[in-house]
Amino acid sequence: MSLILDALKKAQQETQPTGGKNISLPNPILPPRPPSSKRLLLLVVLLVVSAAAMFYLRYFKAPKTSPNSQPVSVLTATNNSQDSVEIKKKATQLFQENKLSESLALWEQLTLLMSTDPEIYNNLGLVLKKMGKKEAAYSAYNKALALKQDYPEALNNMGVLLLIDNEIGKAKTHFQKALSLTKDYADPYFNMASVFEREGNIKQAAEFYSQFLTLSPGTNEELKKKIQTKIESLEKK
């Protein structure tokens, strides 16, 4: 606004006499002389130029604002995004350190900052499940899948909850859908192996446990040995 005011002041000053003081006529009693045609033409030209300049400054150089409008900072969204990334990192770190209440608080904060991000609700569900809040975990996974139906991780995690509740058919459907979306996601193979084992499909169970180990070479050694032992046991049956 200061640029507009400066431009207006400058335009007004150009149409006023210089010197900063009022100039008196030699004989104020006598009526002023009518301006000559050249002088009148010059004044008209100056007025037209000034008006054009003011119009340009008002409508092209500065944005139009209403009394209720607020300036919008381009950096606002970027800053929020950067903040959210940092909060995600911290929440994940706290989860890995088993500081579940602190991690939960951050994931809940992220649901307010990024309410349409399915990843937030999936991770929130993981924390809630680990805390034993199964119904709340169901709700979080449902929200994640409502935002993104073809979400392998959320499908797998929902299947795990269903398997815990002995909903084997529904769990199997979720694991199968997760595998149909991505063939290199290891976790559904492990969970499908567990389903096959419960169903008595020993051969399929052994194959899926083996596929899990193939896709997850970084598996904890202790867990890896347990799975290998299970595979050997299943193959003997």
Image (cartoon, rainbow, N blue to C red):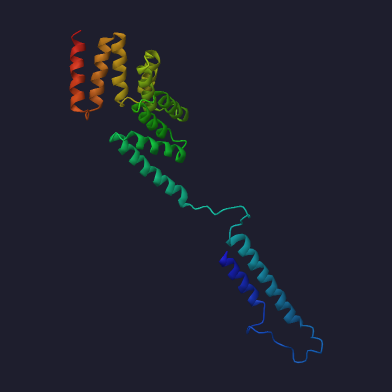
Does residue 227 sit above or below 3 in this rendering? above
Q: Quadrant of residue 194?
A: top left
In the rendered structure, the answer to whether residue 48 lies left or right of residue 186 reads right
Q: Is residue 45 left or right of residue 106?
A: right
- Whether residue 20 sits left or right of residue 136 in the image: it is right
Q: How many marks?
A: 0
Quarter of the rendering containing residue 85? top left
Q: Which x, y percent locates residue 223?
A: 21, 24
Query: Which corner quadrant of the image does residue 209 belong to?
Result: top left
Residue drawn at x 33%, y 37% is 92
**Residue 64 against residue 109 in the figure, above or below:** below
Which x, y percent locates residue 150?
42, 26
Image quadrant for the C terminus? Answer: top left
User: Residue at point 62% right, 70% down?
Assistant: 8
Give the percent coordinates (x, y) of residue 99. 31, 35
Q: Is residue 129 above or below residue 45?
A: above
Can you name the residue that lies furthest to the bottom here?
26
- The quarter of the rendered structure image containing the N terminus is bottom right
Q: Residue at x 62, y 72 (%)?
A: 9
Q: Position of residue 115 (x, y in %)?
A: 47, 37
- Comparing 129 with 178, the one in front is 129
Is 91 in front, or is 151?
91
